Amino acid sequence: MGSSIYTPAVSIMMEELNVTQVKAILPLTVFILGYGVGPMFLSPLSEHPPLGRTYIYVVTLFIFVVVQIPTALADTIEKIIGLRLIAGFMASPALSTGGATIGDMVHPNNLYKGLVTWALFAFSGPTFGPLIGGIITQLVNWRWNFWVLCIVSGFVLALLIVFLPETNHDTILHRRALRLRKLTGNDKIRSKYEIEKENSTLKFSDLVKETLWRPIFIAFFEPMVLSLNIYTAFIYIIVNSWFEAFPIVFQGIYHFNLIESGIVYISAIIGAIIGASIYLYWVGKISRESNPAIEKFLKPAMMGSFFLPVGLFIFAWASSPKTHWIAPCLGALIFCIGALNIFQAIFNYLGRGFYRYIASVFAGNCLMRSWSAAVFPLFVSPMYHNTAIKDFPVGPGGSILASVSVLMIAIPFVIYKFGVPLRGRSKYAN
């Protein structure tokens, strides 16, 4: 929820800090940019056996906690923007490496269950953010959004330090070899990493280049991964655009206060829960088949692709003073049913198809969707206002996004048909 918790306070920050709306939205934008940049460095490092995943989680979250303090005390928007960029960078392992950690702990046949559980929390965080932020802003003040974020993330940091074990298989074996060498004095005990390192002819610079380049190459030069990343990036754009669209609809049309405007985000969470239930049932049936092709796990995305435009069109044209406020909420709910199924089907497919480099694959996906979604909130408000017509302030603008979602329907169907030969030509696919 760190990305969106402050968004209900944008108008108050504009007045108190004497800035424009674009500048007041920039802390959200740069936070999401940090999401995209961080995984390109941190996720490949988590696959490096001497380092592993747990150290990265703990160190980055510690810095995230500390950064909230000067953010809450900052007296200019420029300071807040800079600190939020650092915070987004440090928050990124939860989004990218988190999926890899689930993959470490869960058998591939049950990976979909672990990922959908993780995704529900990841999806609910940004949607809970405006609700919690609205309550804090209205009852206390906007700076306490960052103090609350500091307290909550500090509590989570303590939990990670005490309870989170290392899950990277190669890291566990490497540390076991080091421990056994120390206990037995037998220098012949070596981990897989050490053996490969001794036999490798690669220079350190080549190894670094390969490690950091891998997420970018997989994300942009593997055709099926690129197309699926574009789809998830588009969904991420929609979700982040709602932080601007919802206030336009529910405060501008229905005259809700900050707390009431935050409550309507619950419709998105309900949609995600319904979508997760459908997804678990469907993928469970596929998993019980005898050795199913991994392309079959894209079927929920094929179904969900039709929910997206339906939900977006309803949200766009039901947002009117002539309709009840529940109508756009239903549109958001339908959208989230489809979005959850698309997201999870794609993550499941990528996780199964690129299991050896799962952290790099998720890092590349995170880069593309974060960078795409980061800039979008800056022109959501102008897009809606400049295309508005009487009684339908978000109808035409919302229809633009809904029309793009219609074109996106083809992506999971094409990958379903041609995924096997595309994976066969990839050096990274399993």
Image (tube, rainbow, N blue to C red):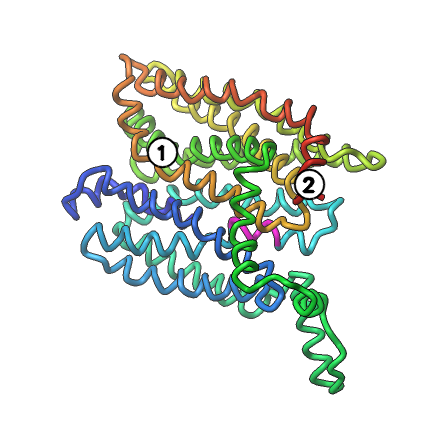
Residue 325, magenta (yes or no):
no
Q: Is residue 273 left or right of residue 257?
A: right
Residue 338, image x, y percentages = 56, 28
Which is in the foreground here, disc 2 or disc 1?
Answer: 2
Q: At label 2, which amino acid type do we have?
A: Gly
Q: Tell me which segment is drawn in magenta.
A: 95-100
> Label for residue 300?
none
In this rendered view, identify the residue nearer to me: 70 or 290: 290
Prevailing secondary structure class for the magenta stretch in the rendered image: helix
Residue 99 on the magenta span: yes
Q: Is residue 112 visible?
A: no
Q: Residue at x 35, y 29 (%)?
A: 245
Binning the other alpha carbons within 10 Å of mark 2 as few (below 14), some (14 to 19) or many (20 upward) gives many
Residue 316 percent coordinates (x, y): 40, 19
The image quarter containing residue 253 is top left
Q: Which mark is residue 353?
A: 2
Identify the residue at horizontal 53%, vertical 35% (top origin). Answer: 229
Q: Is residue 255 left or right of residue 98?
A: left
In front of the other: 215 or 289: 215
- Picture layout, residue 313 above or below residue 161: above
How far apart marks 2 and 1 lie (CA) works out to 30 Å
Among the two numbered marks 2 and 1 on one chain, the one whose residue lies closer to the N terminus: 2
Instruction: Please provide percent x and percent y for residue 147.
Output: 33, 59
Q: Which residue is mark 1?
A: 376
Badge 1 crowding class, 10 Å Cα cut-off, few under 14, some 14 to 19, many 20 or more, is some
Q: Residue 385's x, y, as percent? A: 26, 22
Provide the secondary structure element on which disc 2 rests: helix
Q: What amino acid is found at the position of numbered circle 1 in the picture? A: Phe
Looking at the image, is 375 positioned above or below residue 408? Answer: below
